[in-house]
Image (spheres, helix red, strand yellow):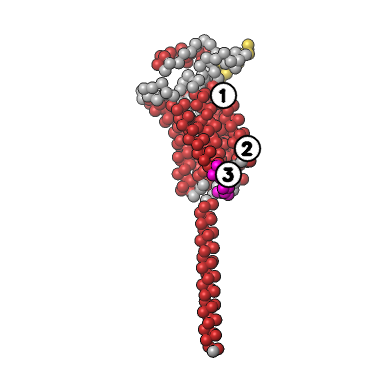
Amino acid sequence: MDSTIVYFKGIEKGFEVSSVLAQFTVFGKSFTINWYGAIIAFGFLLAVLFGGRIAYKWKMSLDKMVDVLIYGTIAAIIGARLYYVFSKWDYYGENLSEIPAIWHGGLAIYGGLIAGVIAAFVVCKVRKMNFFNLLDICCMSFLIGQGIGRWGNFTNQEAFGTNTALPWGMKSEKTMEYMLSHKAFFEANNITVDPYDFVHPTFLYESIWCLLGFLVLYIICRKARKFSGQIALCYGVWYGAERMVVEGLRTDSLYIAGTTLRTSQIFSALLMIVCLVILIIFLRKYTLDPQPIDGIDFFLEEQLKAEKAEEKKEETADAQAENTAETKGEIENGKDN
């Protein structure tokens, strides 16, 4: 099996880490299950279970939820892969057969988020769902999946950072090989590293931040949620802040063509700022003028309009009845006279 010994600066003993979970043969054909795929699948499963639980509490239609899950997941996987592939087209353009090989790594989280959100928006429009409420559920679930999924990077010994003297710095033969084979890339992007020294376990930073973020957002959802979309905006601020910092430590960033600007770092900064501004505006608005939060399967504004229309209809009917009664009374009085 493909394994390596991983050392941490504060621990003398090394740990054997394999990228392969299992290998077996069926009808003469060999199959391999990688830890990367298994961990991502586990994180996805927990995210779905949590999202389903919240959706049940919010009385969301199961059929509609399944539609969002199916189309959103497919779009997210495709989007994450395409984002990564196009960012490294100099390699994949000459190795087209590698494009579908997501089990080898190479999924860009922002590509997945963008494509998944677009797909969810379309499904919500078609199935008459409240998109912003659904987004609140999904963003809490995202943090579960991201927090667990990052450990797949650890088993592959990828997505690590530059050198560090911190006691949790790590190193392995795989990190050394990667840095030695990417010297030209580092020089082109002004990155200074020592292949034989310890590096930042950036996967760990993001994992801890995402799982902590899930707890924070869940508490906000339970105790301080004032409007639909609030949790999604909090997610943008929380994750954007972390990714903006941690991305600056990584050695495998995707860059804007012809520059030394890291794509995810720029995107994260914009995401954090935009979400923070919108969040402040809406929190101020709904603090001064509290409003009921829309349901997941209906839009409160539409319901209120329907109720007002019904009230107006009833008032009109009552007025007509009164007019009819008055007219009838006048006629009867005329007859008596």
- Vertical comparison of 192 with 57: above or below: above
Query: CA gap, disc 1 to disc 2?
Result: 21 Å
- Vertical comparison of 8 with 34: above or below: above
- Quickly name the residue at label 2: 219
Of the pair 52 and 140, the residue shown nearer to us: 140
- Quickly name the residue at label 3: 287
Horizontal relation, residue 88 to residue 311: left or right: left
Q: Quadrant of the N terminus?
A: top right
Residue type at mark 3 is Thr
Label 3 Cα neighbours within 10 Å, binned few <14 / some 14-19 / many ≥20? few
Q: Secondary structure at mark 1?
A: helix
Horizontal relation, residue 151 to residue 270: left or right: right
- The disc at residue 205 is 1
Of labels 1 and 2, earlier in sequence is 1
Q: Are marks 2 and 3 in contact (CB under 8 Å)?
A: no
Residue type at mark 2 is Ile
Of the pair 19 and 337, the residue shown nearer to us: 337
Q: Which residues are magenta?
A: 284-294
